Amino acid sequence: MKKGGDIFCVNFSGEKIYDMDFVRIDFSRNDGQGYTRFGTSHETKLMGCSSWINDDDLSGHCFLSEFCGPSYYFFTLKPKTWREDLMWELKKMVSRKKKRYGDEIKNTENTVKPLLKSSDQVDDFITKYQENKKS
């Protein structure tokens, strides 16, 4: 898939299919953090989109990309197995989101909890402020 070319695409949200056809896909720059930019186009339909693909997915034959709305674009080089491929891609997306958001939660906790444990500076400030306000 890395070299680009024609790929089957379904643009959907839930049961609603906005469009589907073979589109031209091209890959451009890598961000150095595990993602590569891609863009799609179609000669006669409004099926162009642009986003990032996880570099791990470049070696496969399909991927699922989330857009606003929420709407999704599913791409596959093997349209006959689209259903199984989409189920696989959904599992990967859910797993990645759990990890990413789990990491965000851990980072938030790791940033806030130390202040709670070593709150002497805050307590001292409040005490001094209240003492100064009384005088």
Image (cartoon, rainbow, N blue to C red):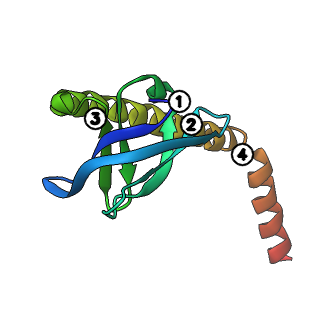
Residue pointed to by mark 3: 90
Q: Are marks 1 and 2 in contact (CB under 8 Å)?
A: yes
Q: Residue at x 34, y 39 (%)?
A: 7
Q: Mark 4: few, some, or many residues within 10 Å (few <14, many ≥20)?
A: few
Residue indicated by mark 4: 119
Question: Residue 35: which disc?
Answer: 2
> Which mark lies nearer to you, 3 or 2?
2
Q: Earlier in the sequence, mark 3 or mark 2?
A: 2
Name the quadrant containing residue 33.
Answer: top right
Give the CA distance from mark 1 to mark 3: 17 Å
Q: Residue at x 31, y 57 (%)?
A: 70
Question: Label 1 belongs to which residue?
Answer: 55
Q: Quadrant of the N terminus?
A: top left
The residue at the point 72 percent across, 45 percent down is 119
Locate residue 55 relative to residue 111 in the image: left or right. left
Residue 49 shows in the view: yes
Q: Earlier in the sequence, mark 1 or mark 2?
A: 2
User: Looking at the image, is mark 4 or mark 3 nearer the viewer?
Assistant: 3
Percent coordinates x, y for residue 86 in the rendering: 24, 34
Q: Is residue 26 above or below residue 131?
A: above
Residue 79: where, in percent of width, then height? 21, 34
